[in-house]
Amino acid sequence: MPGVRSIARRLPDGRTFDLAYVRTGRPGGPTVLVVPGGPGLASVLPYPVVRAIAAAKGLDVLMVEHRGVGLSRRDQDGLDLPSAALTIEDAVADLVAVLDAEGIGRVVAYGSSYGTYLVQGLAVQHPERIVGMVLDSPMRSARDLDVVRRHLRTLLWDGVEGTTRSAALLRELVADGTVDVRETGAVVPVVFEAGGPALVERLLEALSQGRGRRTWDWVRSVGSEEVDGPDSPYTLETDLVGRIGYRELDYGAPPDGLPLDPQVVLAGGAARHSTFVGEPFDLVGASAKFEWPTAVVSGARDLRTPRPLAEALVADLPDGVLVPLPSTGHSVLDTHALAALHVAGAVAAGHHDRLPRLADRIDALPRRGNGSHWVGRVLRARLAADLALSALAAPRGGA
């Protein structure tokens, strides 16, 4: 592929594989190392629009294809990389190897979701390579799950301002058996992230009237396919590297049987992957040593790495600021590329302290990126079609 470079990396058994990466834009200022989420997201094929926008903004952007994914999937003999070579520490070492190959001393490290774990791992092992960080939808620990569950249930089961009606509807639907409590964690957070509280309320209102079931079932199936469905070659490949999340970050923690549990979906992949062994880093303890400027980007609709996690991280950072985006969900890199690159550019220019007061304007920038921002529109269209079909199927009154 044009523009793709690679370096040889050695495997535990002595063989090698080609680690692919791309570098675009204008060298001169700080290089922005962009690390997507996953584990399983590729870096090369899914992000040409992001790199084009970055180049237009004058940024020097580097993206490394995660080992075991896409263009970095196979060894010198064309065989898939072995499990022993697929760890977080190996992935962090790959980032360092590419920086060395490109002669880059220090970077602004931008991580999204799982990518924030890799970026913080890089900061733990090689603080001398970091000039600044952007942590977009940040992860810090397998213990984040406790915070995620608590936030989900406060927002969508107990109800707060803006979600009181939705929470009451959901409780009623579970109580009367219209909705299986085990499905709530696979559907409601997805709808909330894609369309906000208004779309959640609209769907639950429809269900309470005996409509909207097709939409509910479709969202549930999409969530299951994300974990158990087929991969998209060179775009999303979890079959090899998915085990990293289960083995090192406890993605397979068992469901607790309560409403709105995200583990109902994720735990389904545990049978195919390794059991949890332990984390490679203590990122919570390390945060106080991250002395460089850091922007922590958090979408108000993000229920996978919700706002309380971002706030706790900012509180621990010596020079961290929170960039709260009111109408954005998880992974700003994937759902709002202009916002992501605006934040990266500000950190690279030494202006991270201005970002909090500009958060609303950044959030309001036109939505561009790899297509994930279309999910809300698709959901609204499906629900509208579902309601229309229900109306057509309803018995007609009259003489």
Image (cartoon, rainbow, N blue to C red):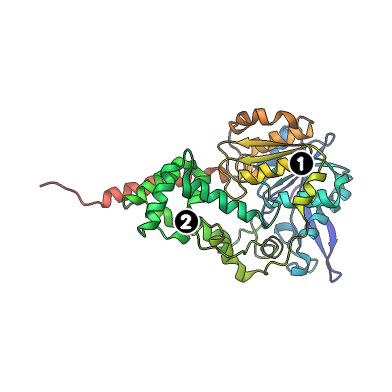
In the rendered picture of this protein, how many numbered marks are placed on residues?
A: 2
Q: Residues within 10 Å of mark 2 (few under 14, many from 20)?
A: many
Q: Mark 1: few, some, or many residues within 10 Å (few <14, many ≥20)? A: many
Classify residue 247 by image quadrant: bottom right
Dot 1 lies on which element? loop
In whole angstroms, how far apart are the C-alphas of marks 1 and 2? Answer: 34 Å
- Specify the label residue 184 is tagged with: 2
Q: Helix, strand, or loop for circle 2? A: helix
Whether pointer 1 and pointer 2 mark residues with C-beta atoms closer than 8 Å, the reply is no
Query: Of 181 and 109, which appears nearest the observer?
Result: 181
Residue 2 vs residue 80, the one in the foreground = 80
- Which of the 4 image quarters holds residue 308? top right
- Seen at 55% across and 57% down, the residue is 262
The disc placed on residue 360 is none
How far from the left and from the top, in percent, is residue 19? Answer: 79, 57
Q: Which residue is mark 1?
A: 317
Choose between 342 and 283: the one closer to the eye. 283
Q: Position of residue 360 (x, y in %)?
A: 60, 30
**Between residues 24 and 228, which one lies in front from this camera angle?**
228
Relative side of 196 to 42, left or right: left
Residue 102, percent from left and from top: 87, 46
Residue 43 visible, this orientation: no
